[in-house]
Amino acid sequence: MSDQPNILFIQVDQLTIDVLAAYGNAVAKTPNLDALAERGVVFENAYCNYPLCAPSRFSMATGLLASKVGGYDNASELPASMPTYAHYMRALGYRTCLSGKMHFVGPDQLHGFERRLTTDIYPGDFAWTADWSKLEFEGATDVRMLTTSGICARSVQIDYDEDVTHKAVQEIYDCARDPEGRPFFLQVSWTHPHDPYLCLQKHWDLYADADIPAPRIPMPGDNENDPHSLRLLRQHSLADADISPEIVQRARHAYCGTVSYIDDSMGIVLDALRESGQAENTVIVFCSDHGEMLGERGSWLKKTFFEPATRVPLIICAPGHLKPGRCDTLCSLVDLLPTFASFGSDGAWDGAVEPLDGADLVPIAGGEDADRAVYGELLCEGILAPIFMIRRGRYKFITSTGDPDMLFNVIADPDEQNNLVADEAHAGRIAVLRAEAQELWDNDALIEDIVRSQKRRLLIRKAHLQGEAPEWDFDAGGEDDGRWFRGKGNYNDWAFDYLPPAGMRPAPRDS
């Protein structure tokens, strides 16, 4: 299968379409991403299946909803026995390699990749296990994500992404010189623009005269807000915080700066692809693992099914395989595995070992009519019971036994201001969607399994704190010097320990 295309899978973390020109929101300056969108297919209605890092990536990697693989929270273990797209692509003859974050938890830190070029940036153990028996979550990002936002000279996340870029570029050149001539499947996964909202001076300066809009939707009052959103605000210390418009604007400014940083990094990788002579035979897939609220409704980060956090950018540039254009068919990240395998087999792949929740996007991007729905789950900390989402047609339905249902017409009401659940005109539609959710998810059995999983992992975590703990973190060739947060400290203390610009540092003391 010498005519198999290479596949370069570029993934970013926590990127909202609300700042991207490719999605009609020309806020962030992203010339490389804009050029990729011009050459590729822009999927206008792509969703993550779980608006949180690790579970989203588990569902994406396996082509299955996170609940089916035990991906309940950011400390869930992806079983080594579960095939991922790396396994499937390797079985098709691909050289599989990962540079960057994947947030694998557990002893298996490869999951089908022949090589990992970097360590990971988040804990590989059970440090972040959710605990429904507690009201608070000790690992939650706090209000400092806003109050410390702005310019930095360096941060641990920038250190990490620089390493990701450098090693990805070297891998691309190494692939071009591979004597075996195998096609490559290379995933390049940066941690930006994930909070903290800190960017370099040169990327901050790109927006010195830019009109960065304020959030469209202010924080609702407690009586107008939904219960889950209220819990999230309290979890992140935002419910009663005095956050001025200037602080919000600074955080959004810095966020755009980090988006431009990622665009620059992507340009470096794409330059290597061209200079190595592999661009014409390489499919490029770009996506984010989930979105970012970015101040809408007074909320930040993710863990909600509102559009800014759940709808994600997805662009596929496949010279000779797909004509450039736009696709408005509903799709989600579970579709990536069968799509990768389709490119690797010229559309003839039938090697799934079990029914997948995703489908091949190649015929859909080519114009094939498809009446599809997308599904989302939220099973982590900060909830009273599993929360499920169904997007079908123009409607998004959110249901839980712990919170009131919500229904939005996201076409007529893109900011999801008008909950239609009490509108008698939609009673029939709600009944159908509720029945669909009940058929798809066994709520009571899922709760039982989630709580059991939490108790198991919390006990193992407690045991590992006694004596010498096992090392599950991936060490890339003995180069891990411990700078990356690997569950050995508090997330916030690590994330906000950054190097300020020279002009903002304290003057050195006289000796």
Image (cartoon, grey):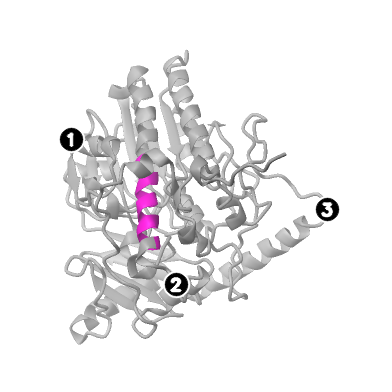
Per the model, the C-alpha gap separating discs 3 and 2 is: 43 Å
Q: Is residue 248 magenta?
A: yes
* Residue at image mark 3: 467
Q: Amino acid at mark 2?
A: Asp
Per the model, the C-alpha gap separating discs 3 and 1 is: 58 Å
* Residue at image mark 2: 242
Of residues 147 and 91, the one drawn nearer to the viewer in this rendering: 147
**Dot label at residue 187:** none
Q: Position of residue 357 (x, y in %)?
A: 38, 54
Q: Quadrant of residue 1?
A: top left
Q: Amino acid at mark 1?
A: Lys
Foreground disc of the pair 3, 1: 3
Q: Secondary structure at mark 2?
A: loop
Quadrant in which the C terminus is drawn: top right
Magenta part of the chain = 247-260
Q: Amino acid at mark 3?
A: Gly
Lateral position of residue 497 relative to residue 143, left or right: right
Q: Is residue 443 magenta?
A: no
* Residue at image mark 1: 323
Foreground disc of the pair 3, 2: 2
Q: Secondary structure at mark 1?
A: loop
